[in-house]
Image (spheres, helix red, strand yellow):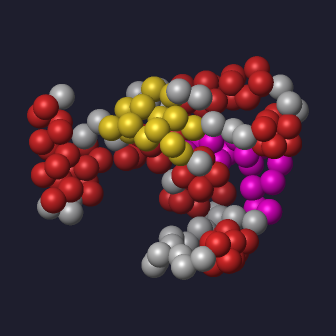
Amino acid sequence: MEGDSRKFITALKGNDLAAVREVPKADLHNHFVLGGSRTYIYEQKQILIEPIKKPLASMWEMDGWNSRYIGERFSGSNMRKFLIEATFAQAKHDGIAILEIGEDVWGLNEFFHNDIVELIETFQEINERIAPEVSSTN
């Protein structure tokens, strides 16, 4: 692990994103609705989500960006599950070895019929199908 730490630090110092992605790492707090691969989303659904180009100065700006690019586009259970797919695709691309994502109680009710077993099985199935090399802690 010491070698990976050195590689990671060197990659960060060198601003080498490709090298950062090669080092196994953990993402221990991922809000999957906004943590998915924009490329995957576009390739699968032709929904373009522009990146944030500068820091947002307020919650109002964040809400405006969210309304413009996320909004109601991902309503419904199938689209919520699709966002989970996009998150595993991004984790795989980024070299994430351990991924922690979860759903809040509102989402559990709204998208998974308040059925925790359905939610867990959904995460497990998508994890295995999209990025089996990523350990999930959902």
Residue 118 shown left or right of residue 10 in the figure: right
**Main SS of the magenta segment?**
helix
Residue 62 shown left or right of residue 76 in the figure: left
Q: Residue at x 45, y 26 (%)?
A: 135
| Looking at the image, residue 77 lies above or below residue 14 | above
- Looking at the rendered image, the quarter that the N terminus falls into is top left
Q: Is residue 89 visible?
A: no
**Magenta extent:** 72-87
Q: Residue at x 53, y 27 (%)?
A: 137
Q: Residue at x 59, y 56 (%)?
A: 34
Residue 83 shown left or right of residue 37 in the figure: right
- Looking at the rendered image, the quarter that the C terminus falls into is top right
Q: Is residue 38 visible?
A: yes
Q: Nearer the viewer, residue 66 or 49?
A: 66
- State the image quarter where residue 111 is shown: top right
Q: Residue 13: percent from the left, percent from the top?
A: 15, 59
Label tally: 0
Magenta stretch holds residue 80: yes
Q: Nearer the viewer, residue 3 or 83?
A: 3
| Looking at the image, residue 39 lies above or below residue 104 | below
Q: Residue at x 51, y 59 (%)?
A: 39
Residue 8 shown left or right of residue 99 in the figure: left
| Looking at the image, residue 13 lies above or below residue 48 | above
Q: Residue 26: percent from the left, percent from the top?
A: 38, 37
Magenta stretch holds residue 57: no
- State the image quarter where residue 63 is shown: bottom right
Q: Nearer the viewer, residue 77 or 47?
A: 77
